[in-house]
Image (cartoon, rainbow, N blue to C red):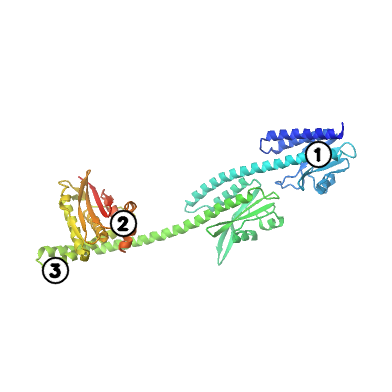
Amino acid sequence: MSQPVRQMRLVRRCEEILHDADVEAAGQALGYPRLAHHLGRVCAAAAEALRCAEVSIHLGDPASAEPGFPLVATSAPGGPPAPPIVAGAGPAGEAVAKGVPVTAGGVTAAPIMGGDSVWGVVVCAGTAPAGPDPELVAPVTPQIARYWNGWLQRRTIVAENESWRQLAAGLTELNELLSDQLNRRAPDDGAVFRTAVEVVRRVVPDCTGGAVWRSTAVGADRRLLLASAPGPATPPGDRIAPAAAEWALRTRQQRATTERAEIARDGIDPDAGWLVHTPLWASHRRYGVLEISGAAAVLPANSLQACRIVGDQLGLYLHLRQTLHHLQDTRATLRRTIRSQAEALEDLEHQLVSPLLAATNASDRVLHARRLDGRTEQQLRAVRGLCRKSSRVALSAGVFAALSNGKALRPKLERLYADDLLRVLIAAADDAQLLNDPRRGLDFAVERDSVRALGRSYIQADRSFLEQCVSNLVDNAAKYSYNDTRVELGGRAEDGTFAVSVRNLGLALDREERDRCLERNWRGAAARNATGEGSGLGLWIVDHLMRCMKGRVRISADADTTTVLLSFPVI
């Protein structure tokens, strides 16, 4: 059989074998045992066609830390394992070094080329001293090169897909841990750091070690100290970070190296083949560095991206942790401030209420017991109104103090009939009439018949609380009414309830503002522009007073007419 025919048959046979391998792989990368099986069939076919004793294939794996070109397949399995081919050693080593087939000592070696690079070598041991003809071996190597290139690409794609899947699962696990730790009073940073390194290790299978360095203030300097190490040999805080980690933190740039000398000097694992330092930072603040290393001589696919993504999560965690710590301190300070303010308001209520009530009662006695001229009587009524208003302010201070301290309001409920409600409304209207600037021309009127619609029924309420609520509504109505308009106080009976109403013509309220009127410290834009008075606490206090009496506040607005209702169940 002529040499060209033998070459053609060998090429076709190798194509059939490698096609079978592709069919079996179905787009995946075959595992090493099955890869060795199919390449062993190629070796057997080549040994038969070349009439040599043994054919072996040596291939270099870029992801392997093993030097040289280890044996992958042979036509004569079962013998002692062959050492890897090293450039320059023997005929195979010369073929690798020169990139051309070499025949010497009964051995023919043909390099497997990928572009200008040598990916491996086919070694044929002949029965004749001269060895197999290199011309017969040469057509086989391009086929093996193409298949090996495809196998590496498929393995890379599969590994990348798997790494992204592992990264997604790992980030979910890490985020759940971060959420749990941030909800604790004392988060376990060590558990977070160990989990983060484990996520990277699962995503980058070649990863053999990892550590986290924390930025710590030491006097006027900031240093990176070890926060988490792979094992107990290097306890946290026992080491200062290497220069590479300091550089990554200072520049906020990721740093990767495969230089053995640099790794031995700067890495936790001096025997690693690659080393990556990723800065941990968020919101322009530097918190530390994530260090990851592996055994391979080259950086694995997705290693930099995985380190960056996990590093971003750690930076965000440390930023949120610090922010929450500051918020907790601020909250504690605010609580102390509110407590001291509430205590001051309670003291103010205790000191003012009794004297003001005494002054109010004294004014009532004078007004009822003596005949006074009109001017004096009006001035005395104004003084009484001021005393009553001051009493209500003192009561509001006490209510605010109780609510700020989380105390429940305890009303003294009593039966209030129509005449009782009329007295409350008339007193509020009289006081407002006397105390408001007469130049505004406001008229405060009580619609008596609407209140008498309560009939013989009654409501249950705390009289002082009700007076406080009505007075607050009247004050608001006076504050935001147009000049020369009327503020009407009355009642409204509907659906088993009776409501005390205050209606005025003034600044319009839109729907959003009506929904927010009862919020603490809230004031509408029109109200803020119309007057600088008020703190946004009045209706908030009214709402709490009404709810403690089993009533509720309702606010309705039609154009520039606003009606506020204090509704109670009718008994």
Label 1 sits on what residue type? Pro
Label 2 sits on what residue type? Ala
> Can you tell which quarter of the image residue 225 is in?
bottom right
Q: CA distance from mark 1 to mark 2?
A: 94 Å
> Where residue 91 is drawn, which disc sits there?
none
Q: Earlier in the sequence, mark 3 or mark 2?
A: 3
User: Seen in the image, is 311 located left or right of residue 442?
Assistant: right
Q: Earlier in the sequence, mark 1 or mark 3?
A: 1
User: What residue did someone put label 3 on?
Assistant: 376
Q: In this view of the protein, which residue sits in the foreground, 50 or 513?
A: 513
Q: CA distance from mark 1 to mark 3?
A: 126 Å
Q: Name the secondary structure under disc 2.
A: helix
Residue 321 in the image: state x and y as whole percent: 50, 55
User: Seen in the image, is 450 located left or right of residue 32?
Assistant: left
Residue 13 in the image: state x and y as whole percent: 78, 33
Q: Name the secondary structure under disc 1.
A: loop
Q: Name the secondary structure under disc 3.
A: helix
> Can you tell which quarter of the image residue 112 is in?
top right
Q: Earlier in the sequence, mark 1 or mark 2?
A: 1
> Which residue lies at the image location 74% right of the left edge and 47% below the top edge?
66
- Disc 1 to disc 2: CB gap under 8 Å: no
